[in-house]
Amino acid sequence: MCRALSRTVLDLETLLTALDRLKVFPLPDAVLLPGGALTLAVFEPRYRALVDDALRGDRLLAIARFAPGRGDDSDGQARLRPTACLGFIEAARGRARGRQQILVRGVTRIRIVGEHPRTAPYREVHAELADEPPCESSVELDTVRAALAPLWGLLPPERREALAEATHLTDPGALCDAIALAVVDEPDELQALLEATGLRARSRRLLERIGALLFDAQPRPPRGQVC
């Protein structure tokens, strides 16, 4: 289920304080979009400490991917992609045998602008809200809506449910992200949508993805047969 959690739910002081020194949960192959949800199994001691500290405080953290090539920075740590998602720990359960499961809900796009010297077992960064151009009246987004009808039968039931919920959203940016969560699986594609600035850029990427899904679903003539 895709349920938006607007950054307006958080008061400005809490948000800015969190962004000044934000805990980071880096992942190699998972991407969180605003409004989306990510379930994580936490077992490494440093990330258990991160979750414990977050739960005792504002419950906020950054979900970030490693930069391509996994090169190290000047401190010998794997570099992070600068665009990440601010997440809110919506639920946490279990500490049996050193494992805990958390549900993180995406709040908003952020940019990592610097990293603090290590004072905790986990990494902490200074971040800012990602610049978002004003929502345009997008012809592309209308085209995305129209393209969903033939796509409906190609999706598994749980994706159709998410897509049905998405159609009720009135905010164009939230709608774009919700559609992306229903039709995109590849981490690199999701990261590109996370990094895409503005509604028009995201809707165009979504149209490309929907077009590819519809093309792949077309029947093909038997090998050797000429149409």
Image: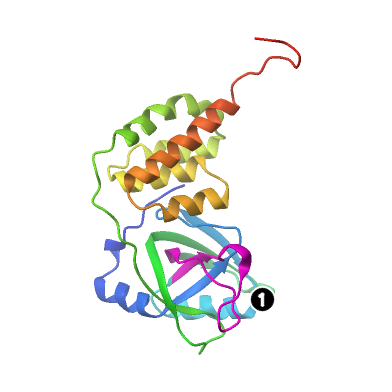
The picture quadrant where one finds residue 15 is bottom left
Q: Is residue 68 magenta?
A: yes
**Residue identifier under label 1:** 98
- Left or right: 189, with 149 as reference point: right
| Residue 117 to residue 105: above or below | below
- Label 1, secondary structure: give it: helix
User: In front: 75, or 98?
Assistant: 75
- Left or right: 173, with 50 as reference point: left
User: In front: 15, or 99?
Assistant: 15
Q: Residue at x 52, y 87 (%)?
A: 118
Q: Residue at x 60, y 58 (%)?
A: 29
Q: Is residue 152 magenta?
A: no
Amino acid beneath label 1: Gly
- The picture places residue 214, in percent across and down from the top left corner, at 53, 27
Q: Residue furthest right?
A: 224
- The picture places residue 50, in percent across and down from the top left corner, at 52, 78
The picture quadrant where one finds residue 116 is bottom left
- Left or right: 6, with 183 as reference point: left
Q: Residue furthest bottom?
A: 119
Local crowd size for mark 1, using a 10 Å CA cut-off: few (<14), some (14–19), many (≥20) = few
- The picture places residue 57, in percent across and down from the top left corner, at 40, 79
Work out which quarter of the rendered image holds the C terminus and state it: top right
| Residue 222 to residue 13: above or below | above
User: In front: 167, or 30?
Assistant: 30
| Residue span colored magenta | 61-89
Specify how the rendered protein is coloured: rainbow
Q: Residue at x 36, y 53 (%)?
A: 197
| Residue 124 to residue 142: above or below | below
